[in-house]
Amino acid sequence: MSKYQWRSAILPGGAILLLAVAIPGKSFADDLVLDGETATLSGVQTYDLVELTNGARINVAPYDGTADTGWLEIRATDIVIDSSSSIVATGAGYRGVHNGNGEAPEGTNGGGRGGSCCYDAGGGGGHGGPGGVGARDGCSGTDGAGGGATYGTADGTDIQMGAAGGAAGSADGDDGGSGANGGGTIALYAANIHVAGSLVANGNSGSVIHNDASGGGAGGGILLWAGNLDFSGTASAAGGNGGTVDDYGGGGGGGRIKFFFDAGSVTGTAAVPGGGVGGCGYAKPGLEGTVTQGRIDYDGDGFTSEEGDCDHLDPTIYPGAEELEDGIDQDCDGIADNNTFAYDDDFDGFSENDGDCDDTSLDIYPGAPETCDDGIDQDCDGSDLSCLDVDNDGDGYTENQGDCDDADASIFPEAPENCDDGIDQD
């Protein structure tokens, strides 16, 4: 059996996302356990347990133009990052271009302007917030290179790298070098996520090339998708500062951070500030990015934990589900096996599986005292007790056994006779 099941998760606003979720009890793959160690990863990585302790660190491999760099997606059953450990994608996103605008997703204007198009300082890259405008030499005007535009969504499930800042202006004949790189992306998908440490996807700050400043890179993207989320750490997708000289590069825009979870809480900090600029009023900082929290139906059974799902990792357990005879509370009413033959509905010590022939009556169960000739089978032996089969006087005989006076214990078949007393004792 596959370790995944396809489930439709309900997003904030009612949108539906189809995704693979873990089947409880199924292992994904090997564990990734880093105890004070450092690893470099990118692309999709699949594990059972991911555990980072004692200063462990995962670096996201910087984007090099190939499909599996600049971003890291971890899919696991459990992810644990202690307070001293981190995953870092700072400067791992879209790259600065020599004497040109910063790289950005195709079809967007996210890259900061710079290089041969412009004089003096480059603009900051955009992402969750727009990048800032660069200033002219000597902070002499606002016609420096423009900042990059925003792209992506604030509350969707998309997650992207931050755009790069623009190169320092080379229209004045100076080599403008390259703008600062944007932040990469970190995406964690797991049934249980516990983060006390740091997730960092900041943009790099601009630099100075031939007395001109480049724009800062935009913050990247961070996404956590969990059945149970305990986030007490820090997440940062800050824009990088603009370079500073006699002109000032624009600051990179803040990135995007998204928390989607069924149960749990976010008590830590999530920061997406735009990158700053120097003391020039004409240069502009990048603007703040976005932080989103949303509740999801992790197991796709139609109910979130807030809506009464008592096991948000198991799609067969939800309010109103059919109960099975397995000791598990499928319908989330707080009682296991009720409405099945295994449950003792009337609390008389017997279920229908134990032979209770009327599990709605406390007086009816195997071995219960019978009331004769009342039309009710109290002891569940298949018939009502006839009063003729009851030894009312305790002499060992019923009327059907020949007792001719079942109200007198001295009268029964073969009892001692008293002569001439007018009574038929035997």
Image: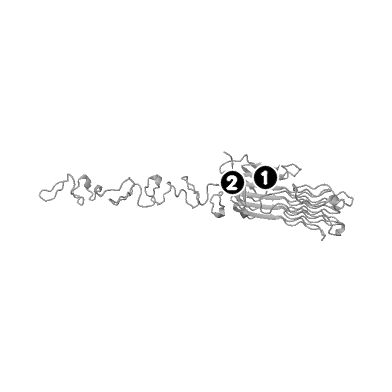
Instruction: Name the residue type under label 1.
Output: Glu
Q: Which residue sits furthest right?
A: 173
| Residue named by callout 2 | 7
Q: Which residue sits furthest bottom?
A: 281
| Residue named by callout 1 | 73
Q: Comparing marks 1 and 2, which lies closer to the viewer?
A: 2
Query: Whole-Å distance between the Cαs marked 1 and 2?
Result: 19 Å
Asked whether residue 227 is in view, the answer is no
- Given contact means CB atoms under 8 Å apart, are the residues at marks 1 and 2 in contact? no
Give residue 384's position: percent from left, percent from top: 30, 48
| 328 left or right of 271 in image | left
Q: Which residue sits furthest top?
A: 1
Seen from the viewer's position, the closer of residues 123 and 240 is 123
Count residues near mark 1 (Cα–Cα under 10 Å), then give few for <14, some for 14-19, many for 20+: many
Residue 5: image tag: none
Instruction: Name the residue type under label 2.
Output: Arg
| 292 left or right of 118 in image | left
Give residue 315's position: percent from left, percent from top: 55, 47
Asked whether residue 52 is in view, the answer is yes
Give residue 277's position: percent from left, percent from top: 80, 57
**Quarter of the figure that contains the N terminus:** top right
Seen from the viewer's position, the closer of residues 101 and 363 is 101
Q: Which residue sits furthest front?
A: 107
Count residues near mark 2 (Cα–Cα under 10 Å), then give few for <14, some for 14-19, many for 20+: some
Seen from the viewer's position, the closer of residues 125 and 410 is 125
SS assignment at label 1:
strand
Give residue 383's position: percent from left, percent from top: 31, 46
Residue at left 63%, top 46%?
Answer: 189
Between discs 1 and 2, the one toward the N terminus: 2
SS assignment at label 2:
strand
